Amino acid sequence: MEKVVSGIRSTGNLHLGNYYGALRNFVRMQQEHECYFFIADYHSLTTYPNPEDLHGNVRQILSEYLAAGIDPEKATLYIQSDIPEIPELYLLMNMNAYVGELERTTSFKEKVRSQPNNVNAGLLTYPVLMATDIIIHHASKVPVGKDQEQNLEMTRRFARRFNNMYNQEYFPEPEPYNFGEDLVKVPGLDGSGKMGKTEGNAIYLSDEPQVIKKKVMKAVTDAGPTEPNQEMAEAIKNIFKLMEIVSEKETYDYFLEQYNTTRIRYGDMKKQLAGDIIEFTDPLREKIKAIYGDQEYLKKVAAMGREKARASAARTVRDVRKIIGIKSF
């Protein structure tokens, strides 16, 4: 059984893009693989969240993972900061990472541009911490989006470098996990790109109905088609894609026919889309609320994940210390 590792930053709620892009597949993966799913609260420290937000976000994400179907009995679901072996291995791996290669990563250069007043060492060594999260469990597969492919390639490089440096075949070189046709790219509401927290164009699984209605009704549209079967603008394609994902086929077909015959009323379409999204998210939202309010259950899940993750991580750190030559007298 192959080991799979995946994490999500604890900087906000999960949205429809997360759900269709990965979470549904995580539920399937936990049946077929040895899975480690974690909440990456160390990674979020690069943006300096305040203590209340940090803890609240961890609790929210944990609740949402569970509501979406992650089973803590089948998968290892844990909080990154609960595993002290992670920062230890992170330190050791940093000794074999070079400033030049870290400075050349796309993610670091983008952060330098977007937050020039907060270019901290954590941003520079982000790929090393990401690599640590993966190799500490000897994962062979990692679900990643396009924006993280370079960091996964660096993980492979760091694993290979360690093996070569110490003449050991210890760390596997993890491959990207490809969901194939099951991977759905959910567009945002702003007329461009994918749905995401940073882009501010997301519908969250925990959004209340009135919030969803407001967001959808503000979605970008155009003046409408002026001739039959007119090519759609990107923003209109996005709305139809969202409808294709959450609505009945008959509903989607009806509005597509309205568009192709130049009779489309975007206001009616967005009202229908908002209602369909609300109908889809209602059960998830109520489940998230129930789990979030059950403090004892969350503590139990976190403790179970901590125990399983630490058992795996401790073996790795113990081996790495021995390979490097760090031994107690």
Image (cartoon, rainbow, N blue to C red):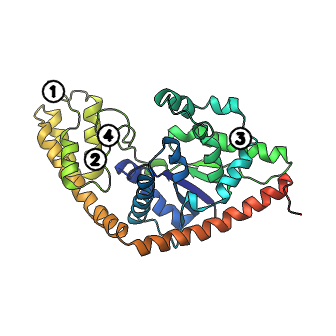
Task: Tell me the mark number nearer the camera, choosing from 3 and 2.
Answer: 3
Q: Which residue is mark 3?
A: 157
The type of residue carrying mark 1 is: Ala
Query: Gap in Å between the C-alphas at discs 2 and 1?
Result: 21 Å
Going from N to C along the chain, the mark reached first, 3 or 4, is 3
As helix, strand or loop, the secondary structure at mark 2 comes to: helix
Task: Tell me the mark number nearer the camera, choosing from 3 and 1.
Answer: 3
Residue 199 in percent (x, y) is at 37, 37
Residue at 36%, 50% in the rendered image: 15
Q: Which residue is mark 2?
A: 244
> Farthest top residue?
226
Query: Gap in Å between the C-alphas at discs 2 and 4?
Result: 18 Å
User: Dividing the picture into quarters, in which one does residue 122 lie?
Assistant: top right
The type of residue carrying mark 2 is: Glu
Residue 11 in percent (x, y) is at 43, 49
Structural crowding at the residue carrying mark 4, measured as other residues with C-alpha within 10 Å and reported as few (<14), some (14–19) or many (≥20): many
Query: Gap in Å between the C-alphas at discs 1 and 4?
Result: 21 Å
Where the N terminus falls, by quadrant?
bottom right
Query: Gap in Å between the C-alphas at discs 3 and 2?
Result: 40 Å
Query: Gap in Å between the C-alphas at discs 3 and 4?
Result: 34 Å
